Amino acid sequence: MSSDELTRVYRTYLAAVVRFHLAAAEAGGMGPTDYQASSILELDGPLSPGELADRLRLSRSATTRVIDRLVAAGIAERTVDAADRRKGVVAHTGLIPGEAIRLFSSVREPIGTAIGSLSAEQQEGLVTYFRSATAAYQNAIDVTGDDGQSSADQEERSR
């Protein structure tokens, strides 16, 4: 496979993933930012509102509105940090809206079949790629300024 073909296949794959998750957000009655917040909380939560704001690259006030919507929908809940009861955190409740579940189910089997058809060595290569790509994407957006503030905080201060 040529480098150009590999690039095209990869970019087509990424576009399909983005379109899928936009459709899942819509099916779940959420906008893309609320959907991303839900996903972050499900994977990495509970998080403080500030930690969630940093991961979303939003201001604290915008993140509060996101949290409010997720709480109202039953997707997230405000609670206290188990390690420090003075600190408030946001946790995912486990609720995934029904239509979003249907979409997830529709891709789980064919993707599982494709991965299951790979040898153990190929599956290890896939996991290595996922971890490396995740780190590369996260590093690309985790750039901070000289004062150690996130880009979102710098943008909010400049308004």
Image (tube, rainbow, N blue to C red):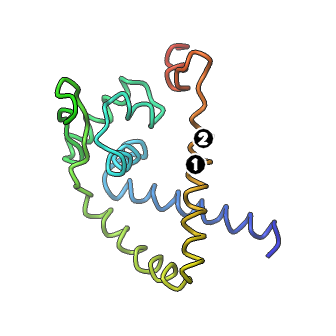
Tell me where residue 3 appears, x and y as whole percent.
Answer: 81, 67
Q: Which mark is residue 139?
A: 2
In the depicted structure, whether residue 129 falls above or below residue 140: below
Q: Residue at x 43, y 25 (%)?
A: 59
Instruction: Name the residue nearer the viewer: 70 or 148.
Output: 148
Element class at badge 2? helix
Name the quadrant containing residue 67: top left
In the depicted structure, whether residue 117 falls above or below residue 153: below
Is the residue marked by circle 2 packed among few (<14), some (14-19), or many (20+) residues within 10 Å? few
Q: Residue at x 59, y 60 (%)?
A: 15
Q: Amino acid at mark 2?
A: Asn
Is the residue marked by circle 1 packed among few (<14), some (14-19), or many (20+) residues within 10 Å? few
In the depicted structure, whether residue 68 falls above or below residue 86: below
Name the quadrant containing residue 143: top right
Q: Residue at x 22, y 28 (%)?
A: 88
- According to the picture, the residue beneath numbered tag 1 turns out to be 135
In the depicted structure, whether residue 101 falls above or below residue 158: below
